[in-house]
Amino acid sequence: MAESKKMTLTTKVLIGMGLGIAVGLFINLLGLNGEGSWINEYVVNGFFHIIGKMFVTGLKMLVVPLVFFSLITGVLGIGDIGSLGKVGGKSFALYMLTTAIAIAVGITIAATIGIGEGVNMTSTATFTAKQAPALSSVLIDIVPSNAVNAMALGKMLQIIFFSILVGISILMVGKKAEPIVELIEISNEVMMKMVNIVMAVAPYAVFALLAKAIANLGLGLLADLAGYVLVLIAALMIHLFVTLMGILKIFSGMSPAIFLKKMRETQIFAFSTSSSNATIPVTLRAVTDRLGVDNSVASFTVPFGATINMDGTAIMQGVATVFIANAYGVDLGITGYLTVILMSVLASIGTAGVPGVGLIMLSMVFTQVGLPVEGIGLILGVDRLLDMIRTAVNVSGDAAVSVIVAKSEGKFDAGIYNNPDAGKLTDDDLDISDAVEHEIAEVVKETHDKV
């Protein structure tokens, strides 16, 4: 009797996503999320919160060791410091290019439609701008004074710098470092297996995360700022399906349809977690196992992109700037919008890795072009939902740049990219209990044979 076809992780995650949205809407529309409600206390902010938080924390737990071992392995795989410099230069140029295009797209669409015109917006929400770090401070802080502390705090640029330095140093030592090289490569394989273990609970975690988010936020907020929300979502979709896929096709020649299909799982994770950094383990696995990018490239481009690539955030800034300017009756003109584009690109470097980076960047832009910073309070209510979509766009940009850079460096396997089943995780890959039972059975058998 033929075995039934195993369900893939992507299918499970999609089911979890759909059920999570449905359950969240059901709870919200029936008002079961009100204060004092046992469903709100024990289910939404109890069970759902615990499952979702544990999953996201589990992913964050993997980020630092995975980036550390993977990046060192990548440097060793490149084997040439000059090639490493080319990978870094190409990645940085492409990330800045896509960010500039992203905000230009956002501004163009928002200005053409004229969102916020003739609307006298009032809001009880307030926003206090945080002080953004100076670009010079960010550049100085790339070098960690304490590498262990940088890892403990998850300072991604410092971790990237230290990991590359360790990799280069191992290359310089040469043959004597072979035991360390083997240890690092094994450690990297172990971390990738840990990613698979954590992802075994992904469908349930996605369900919990989305059910909690939709139950608490609902869709009522979207109606109040419908113009802003719809334009921002449209701009994000245009950037993903037209700009990024166009750049992918032009610079790599690979099929955008295959790319989108294979990135769907990662996009759902990014949508659920709203964090590019937390999604690094999933993105890295998809880019290497599903898209055929060699680890020597992906180990650099993925964490680097998660830190400085802010296409979704840049689009939000462009749309928000037009919206707030029109709502307050401020005419920015061409010069003002060009300033916004330039400021956003520079700010994406200067605020890399800073918590709440999107709103910090937006407050910087508003200050530079003379818009009231408190206007950010008008869009704070819907920002959480829209941030989920922005993150999905961001990780797609990370993966697209990884494919382009890898293809240009000859570190790309087109066979894996074009194989629809390459890197798929099924029940066999994720059923940890079966694997453990198998190992125990083998040990028992060996013991019995010896006796």
Image (cartoon, grey):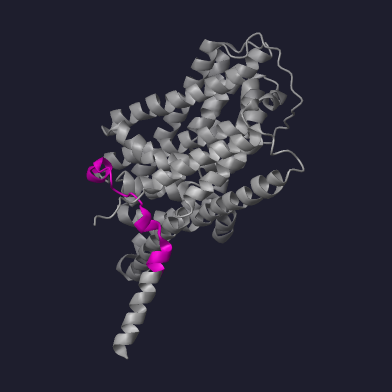
Who is closer to the viewer here, 301 or 138?
A: 301
The image position of residue 395, as x and y in percent, is 45, 39
Tell me which residue sits at (42%, 36%) in the image.
396
Residue 363 is at least partly visible in this image: no
User: Measured along the vertical axis of the image, is residue 149 above or below residue 257?
Assistant: below
Q: In this picture, is 57 found above or below 221? A: below
Farthest residue toward the top?
Answer: 118
Task: In the rendered view, tell whether residue 399 sits above or below residue 169.
Answer: above
Q: Does the magenta-highlighted stretch encompass residue 421?
A: yes
* Residue 189 found in image quarter: bottom left
Q: Position of residue 146 (x, y in %)?
A: 57, 59
Which x, y percent locates residue 423?
32, 50
When the figure is inspected, residue 243 is found, relative to residue 134, above or below; the finding is: above
Q: Is residue 282 left or right of residue 182?
A: right
In this rendering, position of residue 283 left or right of residue 323 = left
Does 278 sit left or right of 436 as displayed?
right
Q: Is residue 191 visible?
A: yes
- Magenta region: 414-436
Residue 436: which quarter of the image? Answer: bottom left
The count of marks equals 0
Residue lying at 61% horizontally and 28% vertically, measured from the top left = 219
Asked if residue 38 lies left or right of residue 304, the reply is: right
Quadrant (top left, top right, bottom left, bottom right) of the C terminus: bottom left
Q: From the image, give the main secondary structure of the stretch colored magenta.
A: helix
Q: Position of residue 450 (x, y in %)?
A: 30, 89
Q: Is residue 154 magenta?
A: no
